[in-house]
């Protein structure tokens, strides 16, 4: 499967668990949570330190999320990412997107070991429709220079 096809499949069900959702509306983990909800995604937030975010039940770990979530987006600090991938593999999640700057040098290797379809080094805001503002411009520039996934 190409990276473009993987991205399309990841976003198609509009149902995603997100590890690293923040209560702080100024942090990237909250911005992603909020914007994807505004775009019509059903989000299952994961944060080990809170019970709810914006009135939505928050789960302490990947192992606790409902079984009907098959896609996992990770926007955690790097030192947590690889363990979250291992938890996801144990849960049977086979499609994971690791936000830019959350991956480690081992992330791809670990995902590969578990047979996980990994999207890495891409910003979800450039692909989750409708793409707006600076992300739309960024996507256009990447298209012009042939950097969009094929």
Image (spheres, rainbow, N blue to C red):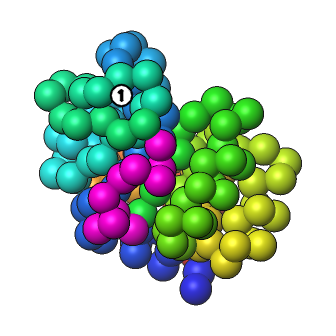
Q: State the image coordinates of residue 66 (x, y, percent, origin top left).
A: 30, 58
The residue closer to the viewer here, 8 or 46, is 46
Q: Position of residue 93 (x, y in %)?
A: 49, 68
Vertical comparison of 38 with 15: above or below: above
Q: Which residue is mark 1?
A: 31
97 horizontally vs 104: left or right = left
Residue 133, given in percent of the width and then of the height, sits at: 32, 35
Residue 103, image quadrant: top right
Tell me what residue is drawn at x 61 percent, y 48 percent. Answer: 84
Magenta-tinted stretch: 61-70
* Quadrant of the image occupied by residue 99: top right
Mark 1 Cα within 10 Å, few/some/many (few <14, many 20+)?
Answer: some
- Using the image, determine if residue 111 lies above or below residue 60: below
The residue sitting at 14% across, 28% down in the picture is 55
Place of residue 108 in the rendered image (x, y in percent of width and height, measured from the top left): 76, 61
Q: Quadrant of the N terminus?
A: bottom right
Residue 140 shows in this picture: no
* Element carrying mark 1: helix
- Identify the main secondary structure in magenta: loop
Q: Is residue 132 above or below residue 114?
A: above
Magenta run includes residue 132: no
Q: Is residue 108 above or below residue 9?
A: above
Queried whether the magenta region covers residue 65, the answer comes back as: yes
Q: Nearer the viewer, residue 111 or 128?
A: 111
């Amino acid at each position: 499967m190409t990276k473009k096809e993987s991205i399309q499949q990841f976003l198609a069900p509009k149902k995603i668990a997100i590890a690293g959702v923040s209560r702080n509306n100024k942090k990237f983990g909250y911005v992603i949570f909020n914007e994807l909800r505004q775009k019509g995604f059903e989000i299952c937030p994961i944060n080990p330190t809170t019970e709810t975010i914006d009135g939505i039940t928050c789960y302490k770990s990947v192992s606790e999320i409902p079984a009907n979530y098959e896609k996992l987006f990770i926007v955690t600090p790097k030192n947590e990412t690889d363990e979250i991938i291992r938890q996801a593999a144990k849960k049977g999640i086979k499609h994971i997107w690791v936000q830019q700057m959350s991956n480690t040098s081992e992330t791809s290797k670990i995902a590969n070991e578990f047979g996980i379809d990994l999207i890495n080094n891409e910003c979800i805001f450039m692909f989750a429709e409708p793409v707006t503002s600076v992300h739309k411009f960024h996507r256009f520039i990447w298209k012009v220079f042939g950097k969009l996934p094929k």
